[in-house]
Every structure is written in C-alpha cells, then in structure tokens.
Image: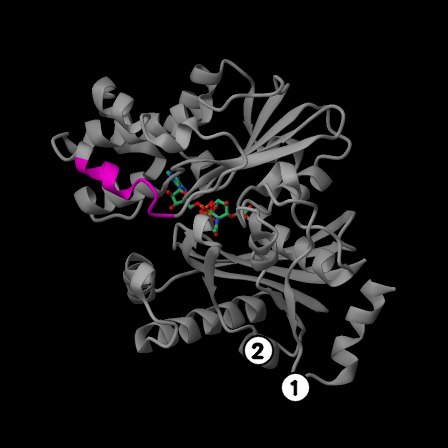
Amino acid sequence: MVRVIGLMSGTSLDGVDAAGIETDGVAVGAAGPTVTIPFPPELRARTRAILDRAGNLPGNDRELLAAERDLTLLHVAAVRALDWPAELIGFHGQTILHRPAERRSWQIGDAALLALETGVPVVHDFRSADLAAGGEGAPLVPVFHQALARGLAHPLAVLNIGGVANVSLIGADGALLACDVGPGNALLDDWAMRHTGVPCDRDGALARAGRVDAAVLARLMGDPFFARPAPKSLDRLAFHRAMDLLAPLSPADGAATLAAFTVRAVASLPLPFQPCRWLVCGGGRHNPVLMDGLRETLGAVVEPVEDVGWDGDALEAQCFGFLAARAVRGLPLSFPGTTGAGRPVSGGRVAQQGLPVAATRVLERLRR
Ligand SMILES: Nc1ncnc2c1ncn2[C@@H]1O[C@H](COP(=O)(O)OP(=O)(O)OP(=O)(O)O)[C@@H](O)[C@H]1O
Ligand SMILES: CC(=O)N[C@H]1[C@@H]2OC[C@@H](O2)[C@@H](O)[C@@H]1O[C@H](C)C(=O)O
C-alpha cells in the first residue's frame, strides 16, 4: 500500500476536500487525515462566472488562467494543511464544463505546479481516456464504492448527493452499474443564494417551510434526461433553464419543489435489482428534507454512509487518491456499466517534472 492524498473540488464550489488514504488501488487501507479548505467567496464567485461562460471560453482566457492558478494554490494549501507524508497525489481539478456528447469534460487545475509546490507526483486528467473510449467521462467513483463495500451485504446502492447526484448500484453477483441521476444540491443552492443570500438551504429549513408545486415538479421531471437509459452524466448547469419554471413560486415553495425534484430524480431510476439499503454520501445527506424525502419515496432503508463507517464528506477526495493509485498501475477506472465506455479503461496522467528521483520511486513501486 502507498500513502495517497486525494483532492476534490466538486460542482458545489464550496471548497477543496483533501483526504489521505492508504491503498494499492485495489484494496482500501487505513484512512488518513481529512481537511476542507472553503473557497474564499471571491474565488467562488470568479469560478462560478467562469463555469457560466465555459462553453464559449478560450483556453488562454486571462481570468480562466488566473482562477486556475488560484484554485491550484488552494489545493497546495489543502495538502500542506493535511501535514501527512503522502507519496502520491490524485488531483481531480475543478470541473467547469461537462459535455460528453462533444467528448469534452473540462477540469481546470495546474498539476505541474501542484507537483512542484508539494514535491509529490500528481495524477490528474482522470476523465479524458474514458471519453476517448466512448464513455461519459463520469461518474468515476463507482469502482471506489465497490472497493469500500467489500464485506457489506449486497445488492447495495451508494448515492452521492453533491452539486449533481450520482448512484452506484452494486449487485449481489458483483455487477457494477452507475450513472448521474439528477440535480443533487446544485439548483437548491442557486435558489437559496438568490432568495436568502446564503449558498445553500441549510438543514432544509426553507424547503421544510414550503409546499411542493406538483405541476412544476411534473414539468421538471419531463426533462428528456430522465427518459435516457444509463449510463449517463450531467453538467452542473444541466437543468439551469428549469429555474425559469420556478420563478412564480415563493422562496419556500421553490425550495420544497427543488428538494422534491432531487428526490424524484433518484426514485425515477429504473433499478435492475432492489438494493437492500441506500447508503448516502455527499453534502445532501446533511439535508433532512432530502433524506426524509428519499426514505418516503423509495420506501427503502436510506442511511448516511457513516452508518457503515465511511466518511461521507471525504469520500470523493479519498476516491481520487484511490483512482490515482489505479491509474499508475494501469488498472481500469471505468467500465461499460459505469460510464458506457466501450471497454474497461484506465486513465489519468502523471505530473512529475522537476521532482527528485527519490520522490518518484512510488511510481515504480506501484507498477511492480
Ligand atoms: N447542513 C446542510 N444542510 C443542507 N445542505 C447541506 C448541508 N451541508 C451541506 N449541504 C449541501 O451539500 C453541498 C456540498 O456537497 P458536496 O461537498 O458533496 O458537493 P460537491 O462535492 O461539490 O459536489 P459533486 O459531488 O457534485 O462534485 C452544499 O453545496 C449544500 O448544498
Ligand atoms: C464532470 C464531473 O465533474 N462530474 C462530477 C459531478 O459531481 C457528481 C457527479 O457529477 C459525478 O458524475 C462527478 O463526480 C464524481 C466524483 C465522479 O466522477 O464519480
């Protein structure tokens, strides 16, 4: 096993998550420390503005390059804050655009700078190879969910409610199926920001005070994404135009309707088998309106992943540590059932320029 730091800044733009993990890319060993460095509000606003323009943005845009550097330095700060002797780093970067139909998934972040500043080899660019192999480029976390779930009763569903929600379905026979399922917290965050100035509906307080508008919810669920078979994936802004449908609603009713949208999207998923439980990770599991809604609508056992001893806030960061080790070993990160790639594909690239030879020996060790 090697000590790897995984770094994730998700679609919620709330901060950089860093987590240490001991792994060989197959087994998951001891968890190391974790830390979240929140985005300074001005960096969050700049990154959001870039994400909103990403479809028409040239790669050499000044503001883009400045934000990329500042985001990378925030990741450097996260690695330093962990104060953990890592031998390898897995660096997801910040997704600003995800258009699998165009074979594009754009994560910004300067891996060479991160490697130089930390003195540790950095695996990055996790999604390109999957897209090149005809996959969606996301979600990549299922193989990590599967590794974590060894020893638990199956069939099992692991649901991440981040900015976007995604699910991994792990069959009793080891089958692994996955896809993005719907809006997660992204729309709710935008709605809360617009109406309360706070970037999330903390503890579901606003949604709890409102009533679901059934007609608006039905129109939201009419989006063609929900009729598409899996595997499939979503951009952060996928349902952005749907926000116009919400305009006539009060802040509380809008929040209640958006929370119901997140829940209904999960419930609308055709399931190849009935999971014995739903384990929920990501920030949405802190929202009791979402958790209660899932329990009621799925009619199933729905628990935060802490109930089986996982860390639901650090899980995606840990995942990119695990995937970094897999990438170095050339092991698959994605499969036909998780992203729709034509075959199991590895991925990732290693930035190690300028590092002393001793710092890169981990790569040989993992490849042996
Ligand atoms: N106490 C809480 N009440 C309500 N919502 C919460 C709470 N805590 C966190 N959240 C939600 O969780 C979000 C952050 O979730 P998370 O960190 O899993 O997202 P992410 O990793 O950025 O997303 P993704 O998985 O799409 O990349 C916040 O934006 C907020 O909407
Ligand atoms: C393109 C991109 O960054 N997608 C994220 C996003 O956030 C959740 C969901 O949409 C998932 O598909 C993915 O992240 C996780 C870590 C994944 O690839 O599994």
Q: Determine which quarter of the picture holds residue 13.
A: bottom left
> In the rendered view, does 151 fall on the left or right side of 102?
right
Is label 1 in a helix, a strand or a loop? loop
Quadrant where the image shows the C terminus: bottom right
Residue range in magenta is 236-244
Q: Determine which quarter of the picture holds residue 356.
A: bottom right
Residue 240 located within the stretch drawn in magenta: yes
Give the residue type that dot 1 points to.
Gly
Disc 2 and disc 1 in contact, CB within 8 angstroms: yes
Q: Determine which quarter of the picture holds residue 155.
A: top right
Residue at mark 1: 354
Badge 1 crowding class, 10 Å Cα cut-off, few under 14, some 14 to 19, many 20 or more, is few
Residue 95 place in picture, x, y as percent: 44, 57
Residue plotted at (47% across, 74% down): 73
Task: Name the image colouring.
Answer: one colour
Badge 2 crowding class, 10 Å Cα cut-off, few under 14, some 14 to 19, many 20 or more, is some
Quadrant where the image shows the N terminus: bottom right
Residue 351 place in picture, x, y as percent: 63, 74
Residue plotted at (18% across, 38% down): 244
Numbered badge on residue 112: 2
Residue plotted at (42% across, 22% down): 292
